[in-house]
Image (spheres, grey):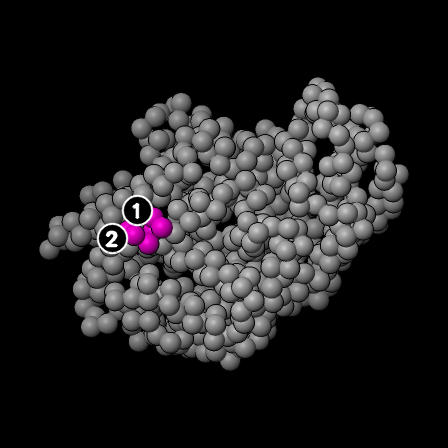
Amino acid sequence: MGGGRIPERKEIPAADRWDLSPLFRNDAEWEALFSDIEKRMDGYATFRGRIGGSLDAFRDAIGFDLGVSRKAERLYTYAHLRSDEDKTDQFFLAMHDRAVNLLTRISEASSFMSPEIQAIPDEKMTAFLDDPSMLDYRFHLQSILRYKPHTLPEEIEMILAMSGEVAQAPSQIFGQLDNADMKFGELEDGSGKRVELSHGNFSSFLINPSRELREKAFFQYYASYEAHKNTIAASLSHSIKKDHFYSRVRKFESCRRAALFSDDVSDEVYDSLLESVKKNLAPLFRYLGFRKKVLGLDELHFYDTYVPIIGDVDFKMPYGEAVRVCVSALRPLGEEYCGVLEEGLLGGWVDRYENRGKRSGAYSSGCYDSPPYILMNYREDNINSLYTLIHEAGHSMHSYYSKKNQPFVNADYTIFVAEVASTFNEVLLSRHLLDLYRDDPGMTAYILNREIDDIRGTLFRQTMFAEFEKIIHGIVEENGPLTLETLTGAYGSLLETYFGGSMVIDEVLKLECLRIPHFYSDFYVYKYATGISAAIALSEKLFSGGEPARKSYLGFLGLGGSMFPIDELVRAGVDMRTPAPVDNAIGHFSGLVDSLIGAFEKMK
């Protein structure tokens, strides 16, 4: 897709949109299922007070709940995908709101179940779990039982369930402001054409060879955040206070402990990540210093950190070609993996291009009864789009193998392992491209540059984000004020720690903390950093271990959510409870910097 004007949704050809008909052929079918679920919800009352009475009642109650959840998941998936096509479309915004409200009501109606399950005497529960008919439910039930110290009386659980929709307010408000209402104006691109600046093309401007254009786009983009900084700061502040409220109610010692508990991840894993990265910043500083030198700059600013330092490579890759490159890069994973993926990417899985009002960024999403859909804002002039496509393809193929190998109850894997599958694909893409252009020092340097920047953004930058989350949640937990000044002050200090001395920190860059959607999902971003560390380790095993390593990795994808994520990775061959994977990833990054400097020497 080209041109300076962002097209309306109706202007996007059907072939470039995802095909949601496997979910529902039309909106009327969605309405029919919505009505059916509303009627089925009354069935929860028949199990109240009876769950622990017998194995049959126990099994029937769990089966009923999972059946409703599966239908509701399908309903919600369709609504959120349609709403994300155009955040200004009021019909689908209303559909999404109705789906969220229904989920809240289901949560309210089923709120008695966990307390009743946890109230079953241990001896009786052991007998239930040992019955062969409960085999598929064991991990699911053990996960519920772990929450026994954090589960409240039934009446309070119902109130908490009723609050679910209200608790989403900060995230919803930020999402509407950021994706629908905020405008970034127009500016001239490198060819003299007037172009509307957007989330979708901001990264394209940051890789433009013209420093004047990069600088102008950077400050113009952040001017919109400057204009809305107080509103967004209030939204983020109340999202953190929401996290604090629920952690206290659930009797967790901190927001972080509450967030990490479901994955059975210790605070030590989180803190070890921060410690390992912060004590190994030297390779990052060395790279930024080299970048500054090659670009011939007196000062390195944020808007200078993404432009390829090989200036004469004109990257252009249409979507269809990008799919072929992705499939070729993933050949080591076997014919089935590549065949399924190619059919999906060229078929109806992907909503490919930006349109006015469309949700920014990219994601993979779906449900047990749908394809693993991918939202993209693909740009053929930006190599980041190629990497984003293969990243989201990693998520989607993880979903494919999970659903293929697990029942519904165990198919929903956690983000902790999800980010391994996606970044693993990116590592394979870089390796493929380096091999493809091994005799071309210019392209080799270009690809090395891109991989270095990817690890910089995923490992170093996301760790900085993770430390920011730890700091701002700590402020609230200590009853401190979380104001605009507090937020930007904390973020500015981290920018100085992670980049200071090697990069000039412009004042507006402190506002970056206000535009990161993931901060509305507490203690989420650290999983990108642990994910890429595990992915680098697993990719090394794939190429050194041959067929057994390939089967082991695909087996890891097929585990879905049947184990805790740390245990799944141990089975795959990586132990994130030790600092070794993060240290190895930083060593890999350092080696890439050496290779980049060496490639430049060959170009002289």
Query: Which numbered dot is residue 384?
Result: none
Residue 438, position as x, y percentages in the image: 22, 42
Magenta run includes residue 279: yes
Measured from the top left, where is residue 377 in percent x and y? Answer: 50, 58
Secondary element under disc 1, as helix, strand or loop, is: helix
Q: Residue furthest top?
A: 132
For the residue pair 263 and 187, the one nearer the viewer reads as 263
Magenta-colored segment: predominant secondary structure:
helix
Which picture quadrant has residue 307?
A: bottom left
Q: Position of residue 204 (x, y in %)?
A: 39, 64
Q: Secondary structure at mark 2?
A: helix
Question: Magenta residues, as a range?
Answer: 275-280
Q: Is residue 107 magenta?
A: no
Per the rendering, the mark at residue 283 is 2
* Foreground pick, 258 / 326: 258
- Residue type at tag 2: Pro
Whether residue 87 is visible: no
- Quarter placement of the C terminus: bottom left
User: Farthest residue in the left direction?
Assistant: 604
CB atoms of marks 1 and 2 within 8 Å: yes
Give the residue pinned by disc 1.
586
Give the CA distance from mark 1 to mark 2.
8 Å
Amino acid carrying label 1: it is: Ile
